[in-house]
Structure formats: structure tokens, C-alpha cells
Image (cartoon, rainbow, N blue to C red):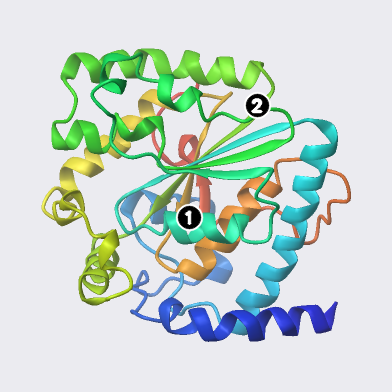
Amino acid sequence: MKGGINSYILAKESLTSEELHSGIVTAKSGFDPSHASTDEIKSLFREGEYAYSDRLPLDDYFAQMYALQVELVKLQNWVKSSGEKIVILFEGRDAAGKGGTIKRFVENLNPRGARVVALFKPTSEERQQWYFQRYVDHLPTAGEIVLFDRSWYNRAGVERVMGYCSEEEYWSFIEQVPDFEKMLIKSGIHLFKLYLSVSKTEQARRLHERSISPLHAWKLSPVDTEAQARWDEYSVAKEDTFTRTNTNLSPWIIVKAEDKLRTRLNAIRAVLSQIDYAGKDETVACKPDPLIVARAADIIAMDAS
């Protein structure tokens, strides 16, 4: 096992160390992560502040990621043998790290049973269909895991903020989405809704990094260029999404995304810790760091119903 971890680190470090260690984490002044109270943790999420002033050391990250990806392989084996179905939605602002987190979920899984769905804007034909129809086409069959890089919540986020949908279409979505998700869950789908939360300062740094990188400039879209200017509008849309679409059956899970290393590890734990799959190592697939991951219902003043 030790040799396996070392080989994993050597194979990955040259590809990711520069990417993962760029930028500076801005943490809450005077905050002690080792002695955080429940109220302090809630305040961190509500105020958009970060608990850690340092980035996770690479050796720690790669060792933890190796162990977690072993657990993900176990999960996929269980899903395949039992005929279970899993859907994971990844939402968040532009440059929150959704794509990089999804990559770490699937990079060692069998692609025949794990699919990533990242849809383009609707075609003229799709705009005439029931809004959820094009997403239904990509739902898993028995034995599959499907990860959505943005999802039907586009309507509550970018479409609403950028004016790509009408008020009537938005409210129709808000009315229908709890019932839609209830039907998915009642049909046997394990549904996870992850929201990666990044600060305005960190988003600006990442967007600038994209704009000057020959390898990542393709990620920068016209919508991305509006992300900072419309920060407050996106904040309102985010809060409204949590309060209007969070349910006990289908809760929102917020993942702090300031440090990509901690984000990826804890997003994986947020999923693994909630599934009782065969061969599960509880010491690895344990609950995520409460300073990084929280349920929206525990942070935002609302009644989950």
C-alpha cells in the first residue's frame, strides 16, 4: 500500500503542484480552526470567510486522495454489482473548481459505469421542450454513476442572472424542481447536490489566471467575464436557490472551495460518508471537515421541508 501511494504521488505531483499551489488563501483573522465552536463555524459559512490560512501540504493531499480514490473504486464496484444508481450535481460560481473536483472523482473509475455530463446551452429544439427533458436523457441506468458539471440548476443561477430565462420560466422551475428530484429519489437514485463556494477575491484570481494561461484560456467564456461585475446578483440567486430548493429528501451541501486541495478531498468524503457500500473503510470515507462542508439548512435561516 505504501508503495502504491508513493507511485501515485510521483505520477501526479509534476502535473498539479504548480496549479494547486498558486494564489494565497485569505482566512479569517485570529481564527483557530482546532477550537471552532458551532456558532463560529456557521458564521464562517454565512460571512463567506475561510478557516485555514495555509494550503494543505501536497504529500498529505496525495496520500489522502489515493485512499479516497480506492474507496471510490469500491463504491463503483458496489454500484455495479447491486444495480444502484448515483447522481452527483456540481454547482457553484465560475472558477469555483467544479471541473477539477469532478476529475478527481472519476479519474480512476471505469468510464463504462461513470459518466460526466456537461451540457452546452440549449438548442432551439430543446428550448421548446419541457425544461428537465434534456437532463432526463442523461440520468443513470442501473449500475451507473453520473456526475453533472452544472445541472438543471442553471435556470436558478446563470439563466436567471443573465436574463436567459423569463420570470415565469424561473418560477415554474422553482415550483417543479422539488417534485422532480423527489421522483428521482423515489425511483432509486441516490442524489447529491454539491455547491462549491468560492470568495470574490479568489474567483478574480482564478479568472485572471485563466485569461493568461494558454492551456486554460478556453475555459473563459463571455459569461465568466460578467462573474465579478454581477457578484451580488449571483449571491442573491445562490441564497434563493438554497432557501427555495433545499428539502430534507434532497438537501444542498456547501463545500468551501478556497483551497482546491481541501475542496476535492472533502467533496469526495461528503458523498462517500453517506453511502453504505461494500468494503467501506470508515476511517477513510469518514465525515468531511465541518470547517469545509456544511448542509445549507444548518447555515441559512430556513425550514427544510
| Residue occupied by mark 2 | 189
Of pointers 1 and 2, the one earlier in the residue sequence? 1
Which is more toward the observer, 4 or 30?
A: 4
Report which quarter residue 73 is drawn in: bottom right
Which is more toward the observer, 125 or 273?
A: 125
Crowd around label 2: few <14 · some 14–19 · many ≥20 (10 Å): many
Side of 294 where 206 appears, left or right: left
Most distant residue in the right direction: 279
Side of 62 where 297 appears, left or right: left
Q: Residue at x 56, y 54 (%)?
A: 267
Residue 124 seen by the camera: yes
Report which quarter residue 228 is drawn in: bottom left
- Residue 87, horizontal then vertical, whole percent: 59, 35
Amino acid type for the residue under numbered disc 2: Ile
Amino acid type for the residue under numbered disc 1: Ile
- Residue 297, horizontal then vertical, whole percent: 48, 34
Q: Please state, as top left, top right, bottom left or bottom right, where the N terminus lies in the image.
A: bottom right
Separation (CA) of disc 1 from disc 2: 31 Å
**Element assignment for label 2:** strand
Side of 203 where 176 appears, left or right: right
Side of 156 where 152 appears, left or right: right
| Residue occupied by mark 1 | 41
- Residue 178, horizontal then vertical, whole percent: 46, 18
**Element assignment for label 1:** helix
Residue 289 seen by the camera: no
- Residue 301, horizontal then vertical, whole percent: 39, 33
Q: Residue at x 32, y 53 (%)?
A: 47
